[in-house]
Amino acid sequence: GENVEQHPSTLSVQEGDSAVIKCTYSDSASNYFPWYKQELGKRPQLIIDIRSNVGEKKDQRIAVTLNKTAKHFSLHITETQPEDSAVYFCAATSNTGGFKTIFGAGTRLFVKA
Amino acid sequence: NAGVMQNPRHLVRRRGQEARLRCSPMKGHSHVYWYRQLPEEGLKFMVYLQKENIIDESGMPKERFSAEFPKEGPSILRIQQVVRGDSAAYFCASSDKGAGEFEQFFGPGTRLTVL
């Protein structure tokens, strides 16, 4: 079945450094790739998304890249701040055989001040 | 504009009881998704509904679980004869456009504990 793998599971960086989280997906029909941030005990919130007709998208300190051929996409956070500490989830959505969104297992990001 | 509402926020049930979880989507949203999240794990898709229709329930266990989204009122996720393994956070999300291809806004979740 469809699967999304996410790495690393835990990432610790120094404040000001960059953080990169990578995901691969199995369903070649996937066409929408959102990234969510979830703070402890709170709801997931969308931070950026990308569609399959775009290779890269940037929003201030956050950027996402998509390689459809290789079926992987990445989240890049630059100039990290302590408030970036949270769990980040990638996801992939396909509309073949259903309309479900498959989430990665998450990356716990720690930004040390 | 109120966000996605879920109630109750916390629910405690004994094994064998029924659990009913409610989700009111954002105003104007007609697409609802339910997810389950175990501690320290990701979100697992359960079901996608539009008003009065189940579009994709491939992530929902075949027994004891059911979902509905009536013409009027909230979406309901119902778990019959709960077992300890059902303990988890259940999130619903809504979107104004469907097929999972647009931003989903999440509710605060219902944390179910089965004793």
Image (cartoon, coloured by chain):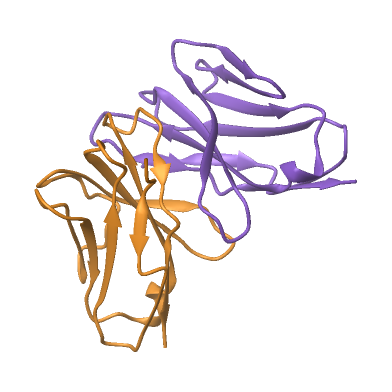
Locate the N terminus of chain B and report the quarter of the image it occupies: top left
Image location of residue B98, percent across then percent down: 26, 31
Which residue is located at x 44 percent, y 16 percent? A52
Which residue is located at x 90 percent, y 46 percent? A113
Q: Quadrant of residue A94?
A: top left
Image location of residue B17, percent across then percent down: 25, 85
Q: Quadrant of residue A20?
A: top right
Which residue is located at x 27 percent, y 29 percent? B97
Is B78 left or right of A46, judged from the image as shown? Answer: left
Instruction: Identify whether A19 is placed above or below B18.
Output: above
Locate the C terminus of chain B and report the quarter of the image it occupies: bottom left
Is B39 left or right of A92, judged from the image as shown? Answer: right
Specify the colour of chain B. orange
| Count of numbered tags | 0
Q: Residue furthest front?
A: B1
Image location of residue A43, percent across then percent down: 51, 52
Instruction: Identify whether B70 is placed above or below A20.
Output: below
Nearest the viewer among A108 and A23 is A108
Is A51 left or right of B32, judged from the image as shown? Answer: right
Which residue is located at x 26 percent, y 37 percent? B29
Nearest the viewer among B111 and A52 is B111
Instruction: Identify whether A22 is placed above or below A84.
Output: above
Specify the colour of chain A. purple
